[in-house]
């Protein structure tokens, strides 16, 4: 396996994904720059790509550069980012190709690196060790590693109890446009929705009515028709009665009065009700999409949150924050993509500012935007972040110190150990035993003994050798497959069906796909499809019986590891296969494609039977 993967494969995979896929998505999300001063003027990005590492020797003379030369001459090993743009100058449209907008530091051994696909002899020519793992950056002559960061996962409902013991649910939603956190809290037996754009907590029944579910009966049906659930939710319905709110209009008016006013200069004035509708559609639970103000999916999502909180007050337990299925690991690719997105948006808003200032002044000379595209902004942003390790993004209010560290070259193994290190977001000073203790769900994913002693004990962890970290997948095919396997769309149902005991909700990456009656068949068919190679091997599917949910996840940053599949109490991998592997007939990929080995992540491990040794299988 190590001949195929190597030990730092996860960093390199993630960086390749960022450079080839994610960067194009970021460009698509911010592709057009327009100006208020001249409605005819625009600038549109058509394509963006990252070149190969080079160095500018003298003016306009560039040549390829090897990593070793960068180490010796204290340079940054980076490649130009070029864009194809279409823009207007005066009255004609112009298309410019390969226009540089900045430089991107390149990870060694990634797809854009000079070293990729070279033989050991060619490595020696470049003064580079063939055994060096790669996976780090060279910035100003220093080798820097971006440590793996551990985060609570996005777009998932997490039910937790606060210090007083009251239960609440929170969702941190994150899309390309917005990041927001929505809380559902309980005060005196009533449920409220709390969000930082609202000046006070809003009763949950008013939220339901504002989303277009006006009848109390339907609200209760969505949340659940069991006796204790109805009894727990009743006070919240009375809240509506007290406020004299019965229709969607009244509810929107009520919420509109509670919105914190954004100081939006310019732009059309919105009424309070429109503002409330916009807020519900785009800011509260951002990741649940609302098309043309069809709030159906968002209603059901909110209802599921309320239901979880009600059940957590009873026999169901609250979620464990330290459980590794609720964690995502951010690799170099994700961190750089956040950084680049921030810089790219800044770059575009600068251009817009310049256009707004320059266009009104000069009528004679035409405004040419290319002259104002400065390269240093994106370049310096990237280099400074990597060399200091301070990731500070204004848009996401993210401010982290020490994301990067200098690669320790004390020995070959210390360099490798550095690449698999995971740093957690907890402060080292607080004496919390929860995050430090060995979590049972880390089994097989993280090394149980490789952690520093002393203050950082248990907060800095290391990956196990076989662990793989996923990158994001396209979810289109998965949605199609799920609907072919009998998942019914949420919009076609009334609330009543959701609380039947045999109806399971199907989630994809924290969003509700639909409901299914026979969940066991769905899971089994899905796994057969995955072993046959119709679905990517890193998509996981697992059931949660207490919440009556099926979770399908295809997002990046999940830990997974390979397992040998057992058929009829015999492992699928036989000695014959191992001999073929040793002779070089087959490699690790073939085992995956033939359905002999599969990757399971933490959540799916939980509903599989795993034998530690071959002789313990039938027990």
Image: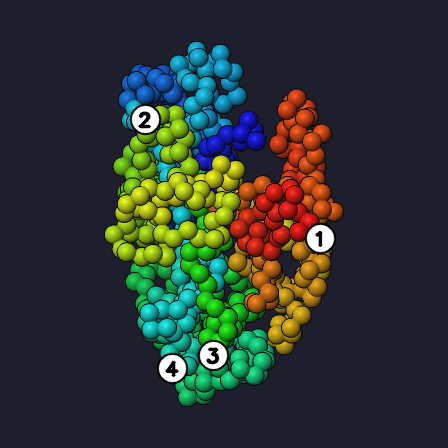
- Marks 3 and 2, Cα distance to the nearest angstrom? 61 Å
Q: Residues within 10 Å of mark 3 (few under 14, many from 20)?
A: many
- Marks 2 and 1, Cα distance to the nearest angstrom? 50 Å
The location of residue 348, given as percent across then percent down, is 37, 43
Does residue 475 show up?
no
**Which mark, residue 525?**
1
Q: Earlier in the sequence, mark 1 or mark 3?
A: 3
- 431 up-or-down from 307: above or below: above
Which of the pair 309/42 is nearer the observer? 309
Q: Earlier in the sequence, mark 2 or mark 1?
A: 2
Name the mark nearer the viewer: 4 or 3. 4
The residue at which mark 4 appears reads as 188
Query: Which residue is most to the right?
Result: 568
- 70 up-or-down from 216: above or below: above
Secondary structure state at the residue bearing disc 3? helix
Asked if marks 4 and 1 touch (Cβ < 8 Å), the reply is: no
Q: Earlier in the sequence, mark 4 or mark 1?
A: 4
Q: Earlier in the sequence, mark 3 or mark 2?
A: 3
Q: Residues within 10 Å of mark 4 (few under 14, many from 20)?
A: few
Query: Which residue is most to the left?
Result: 429
- Marks 4 and 2, Cα distance to the nearest angstrom? 59 Å
Q: Residue at x 42, y 59 (%)?
A: 321
Secondary structure state at the residue bearing disc 4? loop
Secondary structure state at the residue bearing disc 2? loop
Which of the pair 401/546 is nearer the observer? 546
Does residue 220 show up?
yes
Q: Residue at x 33, y 69 (%)?
A: 163
- Marks 4 and 1, Cα distance to the nearest angstrom? 45 Å
Asked if marks 3 and 2 touch (Cβ < 8 Å), the reply is: no
Asked if marks 2 and 1 touch (Cβ < 8 Å), the reply is: no
Q: Residues within 10 Å of mark 1 (few under 14, many from 20)?
A: some
The residue at which mark 3 appears reads as 205
């Amino acid at each position: 396996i190590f001949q195929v993967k190597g030990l730092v494969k996860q960093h390199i995979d993630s960086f390749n994904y960022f450079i080839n896929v994610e960067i194009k998505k970021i460009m698509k999300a911010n592709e057009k720059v327009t100006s208020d001063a001249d409605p005819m003027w625009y600038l549109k990005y058509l394509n963006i790509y990252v070149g190969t590492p080079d160095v500018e020797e003298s003016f306009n003379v560039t040549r390829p550069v090897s990593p070793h030369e960068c180490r010796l001459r204290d340079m940054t090993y980076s490649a130009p980012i070029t864009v194809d743009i279409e823009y207007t100058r005066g009255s004609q449209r112009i298309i410019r190709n390969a226009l540089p907008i900045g430089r991107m530091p390149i990870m060694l051994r990634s797809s854009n690196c000079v070293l990729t696909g070279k033989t050991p002899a060619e490595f020696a020519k470049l003064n580079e060790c063939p055994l060096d793992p790669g996976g780090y950056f060279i910035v100003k002559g220093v080798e820097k590693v971006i440590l793996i960061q551990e985060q609570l996962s996005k777009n998932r409902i997490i039910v937790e109890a606060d210090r007083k013991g009251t239960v609440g649910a929170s969702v941190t939603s994150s899309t390309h446009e917005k990041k927001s956190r929505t809380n559902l809290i309980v005060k005196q037996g009533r449920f409220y929705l709390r969000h930082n754009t609202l000046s006070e907590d809003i009763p949950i029944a008013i939220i339901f009515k504002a989303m277009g579910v006006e009848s109390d009966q339907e609200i209760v049906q969505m949340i659940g028709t069991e006796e204790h659930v109805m009894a727990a939710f009743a006070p919240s319905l009375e809240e509506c009665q007290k406020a004299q709110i019965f229709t969607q209009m009244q509810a929107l008016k009520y919420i509109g009065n509670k919105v914190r006013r954004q100081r939006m200069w310019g732009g059309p004035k919105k009424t309070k009700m429109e503002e409330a509708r916009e807020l519900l559609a785009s800011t509260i639970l951002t990741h649940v999409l609302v098309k043309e103000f069809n709030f159906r999916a968002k209603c059901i999502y909110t209802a599921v949150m309320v239901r979880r909180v009600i059940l957590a007050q009873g026999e169901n337990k609250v979620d464990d924050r330290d459980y590794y299925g609720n964690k995502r690991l951010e690799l170099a690719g994700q961190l750089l993509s956040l950084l680049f997105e921030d810089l790219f948006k800044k770059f575009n808003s600068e251009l817009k500012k310049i256009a707004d200032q320059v266009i009104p002044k000069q009528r004679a000379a035409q405004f040419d935007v290319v002259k104002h595209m400065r390269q240093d902004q994106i370049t310096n942003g990237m280099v400074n972040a990597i060399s200091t390790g301070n990731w500070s993004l204004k848009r996401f209010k993210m401010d982290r110190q020490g994301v990067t560290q200098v690669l320790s070259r004390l020995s070959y193994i210390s360099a490798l150990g550095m690449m698999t290190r995971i740093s957690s977001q907890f402060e080292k000073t607080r004496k919390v035993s929860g995050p430090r203790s060995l979590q049972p769900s880390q089994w097989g994913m993280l090394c149980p003994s490789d952690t520093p002693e002393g203050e950082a004990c248990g907060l800095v962890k290391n990956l196990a050798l076989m662990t793989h970290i996923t990158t994001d997948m396209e979810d289109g095919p998965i949605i199609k497959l799920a609907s072919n396997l009998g998942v019914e769309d949420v919009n076609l149902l009334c609330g009543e069906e959701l609380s039947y005991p045999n109806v399971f909700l199907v989630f994809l990456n924290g969003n509700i796909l639909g409901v299914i009656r026979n969940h066991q068949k769905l899971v089994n068919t899905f796994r057969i499809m995955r072993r046959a190679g119709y679905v990517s091997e890193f998509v996981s599917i697992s059931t949660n019986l207490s919440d009556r949910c099926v979770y399908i996840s295809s997002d990046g940053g999940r830990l997974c590891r390979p397992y040998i599949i057992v058929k009829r109490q015999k492992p699928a991998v036989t000695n014959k296969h191992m001999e073929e592997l040793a002779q070089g007939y087959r490699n690790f990929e073939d085992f995956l494609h033939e359905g002999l080995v599969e990757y399971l992540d933490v959540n799916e491990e939980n509903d599989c039977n795993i034998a530690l040794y071959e002789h313990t299988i039938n027990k």
